[in-house]
Each structure stands twice: as structure tokens, then as C-alpha cells.
């Protein structure tokens, strides 16, 4: 008996060892492995997201009415064959392609498009960016009826059946016939096509969603079949059925690893020629950069996220910093780039510094445009781009990157690094504001202790201003993240350092954030210029791209001249970044860069 | 006092300790002077309107006095509402519990490994007191604990993964809990959450082999945190026992050295080692943050590291509370086990 048991155990061990061998082998040529720094959190396209890895999955599994062909940043018909713009930009009518199937077997039709957009509105995720569209951030919103339903972001909303019915009756999205769908907007909107090209315009399978949904038991919750108002869909957070070239095979919540499989029934995209060549894509969340680098060097992974801070383990530092040439140090590794990205670094100045109790502080130096210009002139942005961002940032004259619509290199900067000028301005302003070399005034610069790059900038500014001996004595204070966020959100500080990214190549969200009084960054700086507000609305509603671009240039120049923001640089990328840029094994072919993508569009890639 | 009464008294103390811990973490979240606690609950840069912020403030009772907020906070904790983690995109408690089996598997493996290495090493060092072997064991164990764990983890990856692979030799995996392709081709239905146990129960040999090979490097790295302490306690305890009269008696009866050491000395010397190993388990559960990060081991430590990088203070504070609670329970368990292992212990 004992011998039999021993033999069984031995057999189990031997089988295990033999079976483990293939696991040690390299990934096959039709399998791509990517060590990503931070994996996705969920993949429901209607959820607000600050994690670009979510979008990476969504853009491969789901599709939209319009999208981007190759490296192009102008949307082209995708699930739609074309569109008509009517009523001065208030009505968009799309014709759909025939015969496209969802991954669960259902057919794409106008009802599925309507369901997807109604779902986005009714689910009403308060988490953030997902709520931009189709709700809109300011009245009257974008799709008809959405503003009244959602009233922008916020708790305490009415999710009753009556509210749901009112939204549905408003007719924001209408099915005209099985292959025609109509969008009725509450106002003309020039960036409508760009918005529906983002992950937020993804078309989901109504049959799949509804099959995994249960009718709410709470009578206060309104619903339509498949969607409960104001409630996240737990199934769709981790499962998907779209029309895209890849299916979501597994999503491991604990590891944030995802496995995508080529969709065997994929319709081929607008040209009919898109056919995934990688049968399996494995995206593994690997937090530690040293591990990612080791895996890349060993050839165990095809793509690895490598932050700019660690890029000199991969490329020749001198060649890059001195000659702007990317030369990989590791054999068999490619570092495509640099390319314009959708991330910017900036500092903001607050014209209404407050006390912790909310009252105005007695000393308000930044209300004086000369002080703002003096501070902006004391930031050596070229030094920061080279030494903090390792050269992976480009100078910008305004808070748009070259990857965005409306970026205008002719917009004039209103300051330049010039300490003499800075001193002159401070001495002038000090006479009226009550500070000077004989009456020095203390001022604190804060930064997030968890972000050393901010510390470098804060120290540089403080050192430069203090060195001028112009009456301001700056002290640098590292704050815990919570204190830091609290400090600038509650306007307790006059000068703070930030970075921000956009999920679209359209500038609307940044124009609003920096240039309008209700905008996020402007609000926390008490910036208010009615002329800029008016220009924002005009460009928002402009349908002609040329006219819109002109209005954008006009607006950014106007805001620029007010000097509320110090533009430190626009990040440049290598690879196709999500949160971090990445490097590839040279055996990965077919790569092209598109700034509107979040991570790779896998059907473009193959391995040799 | 009987054992039951002792256990009940300890449980009551446990309640007090947890209350104290909750008070500390509450003030970390809400009580910082001059800081609006709302800042901990919102992602920077997300465009929340003033109405939304007011809604969130009301939901979290942030306008109430601090003691009232604390009562709401503790009531939430007792209901299982530990807040929502932006990093995990799910409730904090659910996220931690979901990742706990991975950490327990790693910590138990590390404790077993350190016992497997530390007990014989301690015994040998005691038997060869002040001789070259003793000095070598002590030097190696002290050197082991002196290395920073993250550095040692990377070093082991470099040798046992990268160099072996580059030389075309069989190597150990650098990251994760199981091979990606194995997980795809031989999926494992969870039972206990331990990959080793579940793959044995399901008879999934490829999964077992892959999971075991993935466990080696992180478990060994983690075991070094406790190995030195274990070796030293084992050595001291063994030396103490070897001086006892009953050992002299056993020797004088003509028993072989092996029997004296294994049957008489080791059995008596091992009690403090077992309790140390138990306490160490608690330390390792919390101390796995670095090792889990280096090896992408999907446990609570890695989640906490992601939370720290993501400035997710609700998660980090939840993790602190969770680990403190576990430590308290493990300590209680060790005290109870002490009585079981050593019949001389009376309560």
C-alpha cells in the first residue's frame, strides 16, 4: 500500500516537472507579453477612469462609430460608414455598417448604439473623466436630456424611474432605422466626433450586458433593461463583449493581469484588412521597474514599461542629452520615439490665497501681474526638462502639446527665464505690495513629498527668487500627499507644481480647465477672465475646424498674457505609453505611434 | 485561572488594542491639523464640481465633530465598510481579503523555509559552540539579515532568473505567482486560495509545478527576515538545554549522541523557537510589502505598495489596520499554542 502511495506521489511530481518545462520556454511567436507598470482596474467603458491601462484594453476589445486610422489623429468612419451634420451642428446622423457582429454573437445595429450611449448617461459614474461625455461639464451639456439627468457630477441626484423616463423622452439618441442612428445635442459641439472616438463612445453588446444584469430591487432606482440608474455594473467591470479585434479572455482582479485573445470573427475594420496576427496578448502588471527591465533583457517579455527616470539603463545617456539621438544599449531592444504625448508639466499661481478658515490671507502677492511674471521668469524650464525629465519634455508656449488639435506654435510666450527681469519686476511690485529688500516678506512654496521632481522645481524657484534679494524670502516645504492636495485645492498656497494628462487629442478639457472661470485648475487659482470664457464657448460650438483653431489660438494667447501658469514642458514619449512610456524587443514589428491611443493597438503588431 | 478565562480576557484586551489602532488610523486620515480630510478621498486632477465635493463631504460625515466622525468610522469598520480604494477600484476590505491568500501562502512558505534552515543551523551551531562552524553560522545569518530585502530580491532574480536563463540553463521565474501560459492552459478553480494546496486538491500537476517554482525566490528572500533571529534563538535555547541535568543523565545512560540531541535536547529546546516562528509569521505578513513588490506577488503587500504610489491613503490606512489586526490575532494564537506545546504552561 505504502509503495503504491509513494509511486503515485512520484508520478505527480514527475508529471509536474515535465509539464512545467513549457512554462519556462519563450512565449511563442503568436503570443505577446507586456510587463506594464500598472494594470487596468476595470474595463467598462462607461466608467470614469484615471487609469490609462483601462483604456488600453477597451480600445482593443470595443469599437466606436469613428476612430483613428494608423497614426492619424483625425477620426474616420469605423463602425459607421459616414455621418451628416444637421441643424447647425445640433444633430449628427450616422449610417452603420451592415453585418458586424459582437463577440457574443449579437448583431451591431442602431439599437446597440443607442443602448451604449443611454447606458453611459444613466449609469452616471461620478468617478471623473467618463462623465465628461456625453454629459458635459457645463450646462446645457452635450446630449439632449443628459444635463438635466446628471446635473454635472455630484451626489444626491435623482435616479428615480421618472428621471430615467424624462431622459429617455428627451431623445438624445434616436434609432431612425436598424442602420441609422441620430444624436441630438443640447448645443452645437465642434468636438463631438473626437469625443465619440474616445473609449467613452465604445459600443457594447446590449444582449450581453442585459444577460448579466438583474432588475434592481430598490424601488427608488430607475432603470431601463440592462442598466440601473446611477449604479455601477459589477459584471461589466471585469467582462466585455464588443466588436473589436480582441476578446477579453481573462481579467485577474488581484494581479491586474489581463489576457486578450484574437477575435476569430473580426470583421476587418474599415479597410476589411485588419486581421490580428498575435493570437494571445498577455499584459502583466509588474510594479517593480528592475524586474521589468530584467524580464525585457532576458527576452522573457516583448514590451516593458520603463519610466524616463530609468531610461538610461536602456539608451545611451550622452547621445540622447547631447545629440537627441535614441541609441539602445541593450541588444535586441528598440526604443521608438520620441513622440509628442498628452501629458504636461506646469506650475500654477493663485490670486486668492486663503487662510485655513476660508478667509482671505492678508498678503496676496500673486494678484500683481508683475509678481506672477517675476515667478514665471525665475523658472529655468530648460534645466528642468533636461535634469528632471531626462530630456523627455519639449518646451511649450501654452498648455497644449503638439499632439493636440489647436496647438499653435505661433502663440507667444509671455515670459522667459530671465532673473534680471524677475528682480526688476519684484522690486517694482514690492513698492506697492509692501515688500522689498528692507522689508522682506516670507512665502512658502509647497510640493508633494512623494514627487521628488516637484521638489527639484520648488527648490530651484526658491533658490532663484531668494538669490535676487528682492524682498521675498521663500521657504520650501515638502507636504504629505494629502496635505499637498488639500493645500492647493483649498487655495492655501500661492504657488504649486503639477502635471496633468488628457485622454483625448482634443483640447476642450484643458482649455476649460485652465482658461475658464469654472475650469478645474482655474477655479483653484481664482482665475476669471470673461473674455476667455466667451472665447471658450465660441470655440466649443464652432463646427469649422479652421475657425475653431483660430478661436483656440486667440483664447490661449489671451490667457497666456494673464500669466497664471508656468508651462514647464510637454512630455515626449517613447513606445506607446499608458501611464509610463515603454520599450520593445526588436522582434516586435508593425509599431506605429498614435498619441490618441492609450497603450498599443494590438492588431497592428506581430512578432518575427 | 483556567484556560478559557485566560482566552476570554485576552479577547477583551484584543478589542481594546483594536480600538486603539482604529483611533490612530482614524486620526491619520481625518485629524491632521489644517488639512481638509476630503483631500484623502479624491483623486487629484479629477474634475469634481463643488456640488459633488459637498455630496462626498456629507456622505463621509466630514462636517460633524471629530468624535462623531470617529463613531461613524468605527461603525463602518464593524459593518465591513473600510472605505473605497481608488487603486483597487473596489472596497478596501474586499480588496485586502481577496489578496490575503497569496500573502499567507508566501509568509507560511517563508516561515517554513526559515525553520527548515534555521533550526538545523542553530542546533549545529550550539553543538559546535565557539568553533568554526558556529562562527560561520552566526556570521552567515547576521549577514543575511543585514542585506536590504529589496536588494537581495533583485540579486536573486539576477542570478537565478537572468544569468541562468542567459546561459540556457533551467531558471526560476522572476515574477508572479504562476506562469502565464500555465494559468491559461491549465486553469485552477480556487478552493482555499493557496495555489499549492488547491493544485494538489484538484490534481493539477502543471499548475502545482509552476506555482511551486514561482514561490521559491520570494519565499527564500522573505525567509531571510526571520532566519537570523531563528538561528540565534535556536542556538541559545539548545545551549541552555544541553546544560541541563537530564541531558547529562541521558548521556551517562550511554544513549547515542544523536538520540540525546534529537529526542531529549531538541524537543525541549524547540518551544521558544516555535513561538518565535509564530510571531514572525505576523511580522512577515506585514513585511511582505517589499518582497511582493520586487516579485510582483499579488498579495496585500503589493496592493499597499500600489496604494502608496497612487497616493491612495484610504487603502494604505486600511492596510495598516488590517495588518495590525492580524498581528494581534497571531499573537493571541501563539500564546494559546504555547500552552498546547508546553504542558508546563498554566494560565
Image: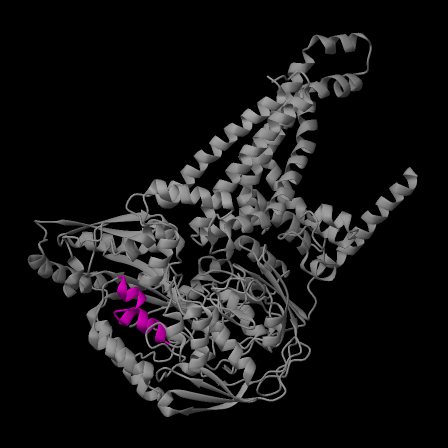
Can residue B63 be seen here? The reply is yes
* x and y percentages locating residue A601 in the rendered image: 56, 74
* x and y percentages locating residue B116 in the rendered image: 70, 33
Residue A136 picture quarter: bottom left
Tell me the magenta residue range.
Answer: A507-524
Can residue A588 be seen here? The reply is no
Residue A401 picture quarter: bottom left
Is A338 rendered above or below residue B259? Answer: below
| B112 displayed left or right of B59 | right
In the image, A132 versus B102, the foreground residue is: A132
In the image, B229 versus A393, the foreground residue is: B229
| B116 displayed left or right of A254 | right
Residue reaching furthest front? Answer: A219
Figure coloring: one colour
Q: Residue at x 61, y 77 (%)?
A: A245
* x and y percentages locating residue A122 in the rendered image: 47, 71
- Predominant SS along the magenta part: helix
Q: Residue at x 37, y 88 (%)?
A: A89
Q: Is residue A116 part of the magenta span, yes or no?
A: no
* x and y percentages locating residue A94 in the rendered image: 49, 88
Split into 4 quadrants, where in the image is the N terminus of chain A?
A: top right
Split into 4 quadrants, where in the image is the C terminus of chain A?
A: bottom right
In the image, B313 versus A131, the foreground residue is: A131
Is B258 rendered above or below residue B85? Answer: above
Is B21 rendered above or below residue B307? Answer: above
Q: Is residue A523 part of the magenta span, yes or no?
A: yes
Is A344 rendered above or below residue A477? Answer: below
Amino acid at each position: 500500500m505504502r509503495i503504491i502511495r509513494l509511486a503515485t506521489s512520484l508520478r505527480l511530481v514527475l508529471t509536474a516537472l515535465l509539464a512545467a518545462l513549457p512554462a519556462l520556454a519563450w512565449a511563442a511567436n503568436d503570443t505577446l507579453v507586456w510587463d506594464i507598470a500598472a494594470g487596468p482596474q476595470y474595463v467598462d467603458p462607461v466608467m470614469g477612469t484615471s487609469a490609462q491601462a483601462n483604456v488600453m484594453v477597451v480600445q482593443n476589445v470595443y469599437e466606436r462609430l469613428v476612430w483613428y486610422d494608423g497614426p492619424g489623429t483625425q477620426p474616420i468612419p469605423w463602425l459607421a460608414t459616414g455621418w451628416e451634420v444637421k441643424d447647425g451642428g445640433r444633430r449628427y446622423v450616422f449610417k452603420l455598417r451592415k453585418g458586424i457582429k459582437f463577440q457574443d454573437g449579437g448583431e451591431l445595429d442602431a439599437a446597440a448604439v443607442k443602448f451604449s450611449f443611454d447606458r453611459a448617461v444613466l449609469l452616471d459614474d461620478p468617478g471623473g473623466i467618463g462623465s465628461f461625455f456625453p454629459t458635459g461639464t457645463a450646462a446645457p451639456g452635450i446630449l439632449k436630456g443628459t444635463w438635466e439627468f446628471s446635473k454635472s457630477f455630484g451626489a444626491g441626484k435623482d435616479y428615480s424611474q421618472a428621471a430615467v423616463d424624462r431622459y429617455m423622452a428627451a431623445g438624445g439618441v434616436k434609432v431612425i432605422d436598424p442602420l441609422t442612428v441620430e444624436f441630438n445635442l443640447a448645443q452645437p459641439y465642434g468636438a463631438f466626433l473626437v469625443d465619440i472616438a474616445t473609449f467613452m463612445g465604445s459600443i457594447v453588446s446590449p444582449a450581453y450586458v442585459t444577460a448579466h444584469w438583474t432588475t434592481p430591487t430598490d424601488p427608488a432606482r430607475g432603470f431601463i433593461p440592462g442598466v440601473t440608474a446611477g449604479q455601477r455594473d459589477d459584471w461589466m467591470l471585469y467582462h466585455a463583449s464588443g466588436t473589436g479585434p480582441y476578446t477579453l479572455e481573462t481579467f485577474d482582479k488581484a494581479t491586474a493581469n489581463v489576457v486578450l485573445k484574437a477575435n476569430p470573427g473580426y470583421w476587418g475594420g474599415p479597410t476589411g484588412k485588419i486581421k490580428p496576427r498575435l493570437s494571445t496578448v498577455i499584459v502583466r502588471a509588474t510594479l517593480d521597474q528592475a524586474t521589468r527591465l530584467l524580464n525585457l533583457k532576458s527576452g522573457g517579455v516583448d514590451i516593458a514599461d520603463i519610466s524616463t527616470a530609468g531610461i538610461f539603463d536602456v539608451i545611451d545617456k550622452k547621445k540622447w542629452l547631447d545629440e537627441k539621438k535614441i541609441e539602445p544599449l541593450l541588444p535586441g531592444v528598440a526604443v521608438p520615439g520620441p513622440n509628442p504625448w498628452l501629458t504636461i508639466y506646469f506650475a500654477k499661481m493663485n490670486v486668492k490665497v486663503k487662510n485655513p478658515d476660508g478667509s482671505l490671507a492678508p498678503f496676496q502677492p500673486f494678484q500683481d501681474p508683475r509678481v506672477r511674471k517675476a515667478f514665471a521668469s525665475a523658472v529655468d524650464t530648460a534645466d528642468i526638462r533636461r535634469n528632471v525629465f531626462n530630456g523627455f519634455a519639449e518646451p511649450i508656449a501654452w498648455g497644449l502639446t503638439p499632439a493636440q488639435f489647436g496647438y499653435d506654435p505661433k502663440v507667444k510666450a509671455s515670459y522667459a527665464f530671465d532673473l534680471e527681469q524677475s528682480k526688476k519686476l519684484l522690486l517694482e511690485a514690492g513698492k506697492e505690495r509692501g515688500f522689498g529688500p528692507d522689508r522682506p516678506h516670507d512665502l512658502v512654496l509647497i510640493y508633494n513629498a512623494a514627487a521628488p521632481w516637484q521638489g527639484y522645481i520648488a527648490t530651484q524657484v526658491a533658490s532663484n527668487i531668494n538669490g535676487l534679494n528682492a524682498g521675498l524670502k521663500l521657504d520650501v516645504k515638502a507636504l504629505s500627499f494629502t496635505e499637498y492636495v488639500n493645500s492647493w485645492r483649498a487655495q492655501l498656497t500661492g504657488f504649486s507644481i503639477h502635471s496633468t494628462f488628457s485622454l483625448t487629442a482634443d483640447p476642450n478639457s484643458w482649455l476649460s480647465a485652465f482658461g475658464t472661470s469654472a475650469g478645474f485648475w482655474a477655479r483653484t487659482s481664482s482665475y476669471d477672465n470673461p473674455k476667455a470664457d466667451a472665447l471658450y464657448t465660441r470655440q466649443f460650438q464652432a463646427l469649422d475646424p479652421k475657425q475653431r483653431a483660430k478661436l483656440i489660438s486667440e483664447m490661449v494667447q489671451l490667457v497666456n498674457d494673464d500669466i497664471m501658469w508656468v508651462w514647464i514642458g510637454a512630455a515626449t514619449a517613447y513606445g506607446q505609453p499608458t501611464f509610463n512610456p515603454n520599450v520593445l524587443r526588436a522582434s516586435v514589428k508593425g509599431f506605429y505611434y498614435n498619441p490618441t491611443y492609450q497603450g498599443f493597438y494590438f492588431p497592428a503588431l506581430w512578432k518575427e | 485561572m483556567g484556560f478559557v478565562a485566560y482566552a476570554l480576557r485576552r479577547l477583551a484586551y484584543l478589542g481594546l488594542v483594536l480600538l486603539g489602532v482604529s483611533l490612530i488610523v482614524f486620526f491619520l486620515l481625518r485629524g491632521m491639523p489644517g488639512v481638509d480630510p476630503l483631500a484623502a478621498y479624491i483623486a487629484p486632477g479629477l474634475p469634481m464640481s463643488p456640488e459633488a465635493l459637498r455630496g462626498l463631504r456629507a456622505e463621509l460625515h466630514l462636517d460633524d465633530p471629530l468624535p462623531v466622525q470617529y463613531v461613524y468610522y468605527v461603525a463602518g469598520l464593524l459593518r465591513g465598510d473600510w472605505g473605497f480604494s481608488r487603486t483597487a477600484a473596489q472596497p478596501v476590505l474586499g480588496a485586502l481579503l481577496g489578496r490575503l491568500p497569496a500573502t499567507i501562502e508566501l509568509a507560511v512558505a517563508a516561515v517554513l523555509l526559515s525553520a527548515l534552515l534555521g533550526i538545523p543551523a542553530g542546533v549545529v551551531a550550539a553543538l559546535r559552540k565557539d568553533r568554526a562552524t558556529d562562527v560561520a553560522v552566526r556570521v552567515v545569518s547576521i549577514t543575511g539579515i543585514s542585506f536590504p530585502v529589496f536588494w537581495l530580491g533583485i540579486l536573486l532574480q539576477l542570478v537565478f532568473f537572468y544569468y541562468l536563463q542567459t546561459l540556457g540553463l533551467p531558471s526560476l521565474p522572476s515574477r508572479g505567482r504562476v506562469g502565464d501560459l500555465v494559468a491559461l492552459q491549465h486553469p485552477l478553480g480556487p478552493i482555499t486560495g493557496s495555489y499549492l494546496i488547491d493544485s494538489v486538491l484538484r490534481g493539477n500537476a502543471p499548475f502545482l509545478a509552476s506555482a511551486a517554482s514561482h514561490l521559491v525566490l520570494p519565499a527564500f528572500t522573505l525567509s531571510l527576515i526571520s532566519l537570523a533571529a531563528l538561528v540565534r534563538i535556536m542556538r541559545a535555547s539548545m545551549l541552555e538545554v544541553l546544560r541541563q541535568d537530564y541531558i547529562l543523565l541521558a548521556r551517562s545512560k550511554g544513549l547515542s549522541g544523536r538520540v540525546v540531541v534529537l529526542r531529549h535536547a531538541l524537543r525541549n529546546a524547540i518551544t521558544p523557537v516555535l513561538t518565535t516562528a509564530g510571531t514572525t509569521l505576523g511580522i512577515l505578513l506585514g513585511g511582505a510589502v517589499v518582497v511582493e513588490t520586487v516579485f510582483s506577488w499579488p498579495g496585500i503587500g503589493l496592493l499597499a505598495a500600489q496604494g502608496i504610489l497612487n497616493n491612495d491613503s484610504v487603502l494604505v490606512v486600511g492596510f495598516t489596520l488590517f495588518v495590525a489586526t492580524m498581528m494581534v490575532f497571531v499573537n493571541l494564537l501563539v500564546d494559546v499554542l504555547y500552552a498546547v506545546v508546553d504542558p508546563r504552561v498554566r494560565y
